[in-house]
Image (cartoon, helix red, strand yellow):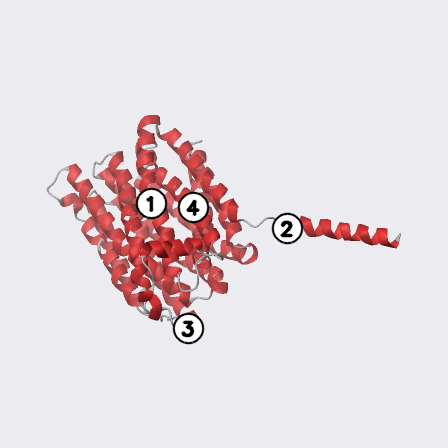
């Protein structure tokens, strides 16, 4: 059963991530190609995050009220991926630039609703399918395979965008993404779901949303860890959002890079994420998820300030590799800790609360980042983004285990002195 589900969840992820790799790294560039301002680029990052924040908790109630999660995932994930298709026709609309930008933001925001529901259901489902003691190994290997296809998709997209004229290039890209998304749904339908006994029977008797959030945070065993873990990720994702609109602006308007070069950056970062996935899976098995998260958070916190130190392409490629390497560890550790810090049977609520928080951060961050950019320029915005990300390390340190090795050594030394004194 585990082997079968690993094969199909990996194949599904490879097809799906190809679709995401084709278009997601270029959505901001697409907005700029339509002639939009930095405000719409920021809105493209923040509006979907707001929709996610509003949807995640109701999604958790919906998921926890069902014994079978796979049909829900297929329905909502299919709807999410089919919405790539209308994005292809935005440049052909007989409308002004502002209207086209608004349509782009509206469709991407609408996509986030079924994406949020399917994401909560999928995470809860695979949390039941794969045992906790094997998740690090399983998802480290899966992430490597899935990430590789996303990298190849991004690499192909960068060259396709430069090869064809606008807007035909983007139209072809979104049509291809829709096809790969549909293939992913077909492969996902082959998975075999594991239904925990008793969980669905009590789902409808559970309290309301606010009560369930309080119960999750107040839990004696999991509450404190989940709270500080979630707050640390909130700060990190706020930092991500703060600089989200700056990357296409910096690459296109400051550095005047081609689509192929921008695609190359995303490709290299993706390759680094792929290569690091298996490595971080082994580190997690030896040292734990929190240590991996702390190390990788530190690397991502320094990234924005370090990125603008040089305009050399070789330097920027190296920075992208470092970013991807750290992101691989963050992705794996965060996925494992969300499930580890949830009470049995409450994984959907934990996923929903966590994602609600980071999406609130992703919603607010781009607006404040754009305001900061308009006032102080892009370089200071990157520096400020690093400062925001550093807060995540302070919050995560609240749940890090203190080194205990020194204490036993001291105690052994004291016991030895006591024995000597008794012998004397």
The residues bearing labels 1 and 3 have C-alpha atoms spaced at a distance of 37 Å
Q: Which comes before the other along the chain, label 4 or label 1?
A: 4
Residue 12 placement: quadrant: bottom left
Badge 3 crowding class, 10 Å Cα cut-off, few under 14, some 14 to 19, many 20 or more, is: few
Q: Position of residue 75 (x, y in %)?
A: 25, 63
Nearest to the observer: residue 357 or residue 223: 223
| Cα separation between marks 2 and 1 | 37 Å
In this view, which residue lies farthest toward the left? 94
- Decide which of tag 2 and tag 3 comes sooner along the chain: 3
Residue under the point 15% across and 40% down: 99
Q: Nearer the viewer, residue 118 or 313?
A: 118
Which residue matches tag 3? 1
**Marks 3/4: CA distance?**
36 Å
The residue that disc 1 covers is 360
Q: Residue at x 81, y 50 (%)?
A: 417
Q: Earlier in the sequence, mark 3 or mark 4?
A: 3
Mark 2 to mark 3 CA distance (whole Å): 40 Å
Confirm whether residue 15 shows in the render: no
Q: Which residue in the protein does label 4 denote? A: 231
Residue 117 is situated, as x and y percent measured from the top left of the image, at 29, 57
Q: Position of residue 39 (x, y in %)?
A: 26, 35
Query: On the rendered image, what quadrant is the N terminus found in?
Result: bottom left
Residue placed under numbered mark 2 in the picture: 404
The answer to whether marks 1 and 3 mark residues whose Cβ atoms lie closer than 8 Å is no
Q: Are marks 2 and 3 in contact (CB under 8 Å)?
A: no
């Amino acid at each position: 059963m585990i082997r079968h589900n690993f094969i199909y969840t990996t194949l599904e992820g490879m097809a799906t991530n190809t679709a995401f790799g084709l278009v997601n790294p270029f959505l901001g560039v697409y907005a700029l190609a339509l002639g939009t301002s930095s405000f719409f680029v920021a809105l493209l990052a923040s509006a979907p995050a707001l929709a996610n924040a509003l949807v995640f908790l109701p999604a958790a109630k919906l998921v926890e009220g069902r014994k079978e999660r796979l049909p829900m995932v297929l329905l909502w994930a299919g709807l999410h991926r089919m919405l790539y298709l209308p994005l292809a026709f935005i440049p052909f609309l007989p409308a002004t630039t502002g209207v086209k930008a608004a349509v782009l933001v509206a469709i991407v925001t609408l996509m986030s609703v079924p994406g949020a529901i399917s994401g909560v259901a999928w995470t809860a489902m695979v949390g039941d399918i794969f045992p906790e003691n094997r998740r690090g190994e399983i998802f480290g290997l899966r992430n490597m395979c899935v990430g590789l296809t996303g990298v190849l998709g991004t690499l192909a997209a960068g060259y396709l965008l430069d090869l064809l004229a606008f807007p035909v290039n983007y139209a072809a890209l979104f049509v291809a993404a829709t096809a790969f998304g549909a293939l992913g749904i077909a492969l996902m339908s082959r998975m075999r779901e594991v239904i925990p006994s008793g969980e669905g029977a009590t789902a409808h008797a559970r309290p309301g949303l606010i009560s369930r959030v309080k119960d999750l945070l107040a839990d004696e065993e999991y509450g404190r860890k989940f709270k500080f873990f979630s707050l640390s990720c909130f700060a990190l994702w706020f930092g991500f959002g703060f600089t989200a609109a700056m990357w296409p602006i910096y690459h296109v308007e400051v550095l005047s890079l081609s689509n192929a070069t921008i695609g190359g950056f995303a490709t290299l970062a993706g390759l680094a994420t792929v290569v690091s996935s298996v490595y971080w899976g082994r580190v997690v098995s030896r040292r734990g998820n929190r240590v991996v998260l702390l190390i990788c958070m530190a690397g991502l916190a320094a990234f924005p300030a370090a990125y603008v130190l040089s305009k050399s392409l070789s330097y920027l490629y190296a920075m992208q590799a470092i970013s991807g390497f750290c992101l691989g560890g963050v992705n794996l550790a965060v996925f494992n800790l969300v499930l580890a810090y949830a009470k049995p049977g409450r994984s959907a609520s934990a996923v929903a609360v966590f994602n609600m928080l980071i999406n609130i951060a992703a919603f607010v961050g781009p607006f404040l980042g754009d305001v900061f950019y308009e006032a102080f320029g892009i370089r200071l915005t990157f520096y400020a983004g690093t400062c925001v990300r550093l807060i995540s390390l302070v919050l995560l340190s609240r749940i890090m285990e203190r080194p205990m090795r020194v204490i036993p050594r001291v105690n052994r030394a004291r016991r030895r002195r006591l024995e000597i004194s008794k012998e004397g």
